[in-house]
Amino acid sequence: MTERLPEPIPPQTVHEPADPDAALARRNVIFGLALFGFVLLLYGATILVAYVYLALD
């Protein structure tokens, strides 16, 4: 009988997660709120165009 081969050693490359600083987090929040505002503006413009279309029909 032959012996089993030893298990390979798992890689020991562990990287700590990046910790975003406050400026980056603040910029991301502002960007997210700006995108949300843009979506609301687009939605409102769609409804406005629909009412104008019905009024001019």
Image (spheres, rainbow, N blue to C red):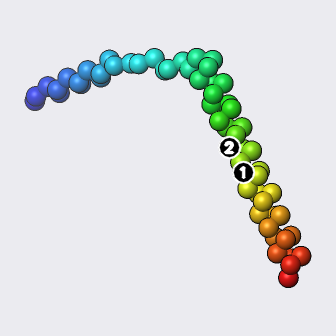
Specify the label residue 35 is tagged with. 2
Q: Is residue 25 left or right of residue 37?
A: left
52 sits to left or right of 22: right
**Quarter holding the N terminus?**
top left
Residue toward you, 12 or 6: 12
Give the vertical position of 18 relative to 38 (above or below).
above
Q: Is residue 54 above or below residue 1?
A: below
Mark 2 is on which residue type?
Leu
The one of 35 and 2 positioned closer to us in this rendering: 35
Query: Do residues under tags 1 and 2 come within 8 Å of each other at their CB atoms?
Result: yes
> Which residue is outermost to the front?
56
* Front position in the image: 15 or 8: 15
Farthest residue to the right: give it.
55
Q: Quadrant of residue 34?
A: top right
Dot 1: element: helix
> Could you tell me residue 37's position as x and y percent?
74, 44
Residue positioned 26% across, 20% down in the render? 9
Q: For marks 1 and 2, give the CA distance.
A: 6 Å
Label 1: how many residues lie within 10 Å, few (<14), some (14-19) or many (20+)? few
Left or right of 31? Residue 15 is left
**Amino acid beneath label 1:** Val
Helix, strand or loop status at disc 2: helix
Placement of the C terminus among the 4 image quadrants: bottom right
Q: Determine which residue is flagged by label 1.
A: 39
Dot 2, crowdedness within 10 Å: few (<14), some or many (≥20)?
few
Q: Quadrant of residue 43?
A: bottom right
Which residue is at a point 77% across and 63% down the rendered structure image?
A: 46
**Residue plotted at (82% across, 64% down):** 47
The one of 35 and 20 positioned closer to us in this rendering: 35
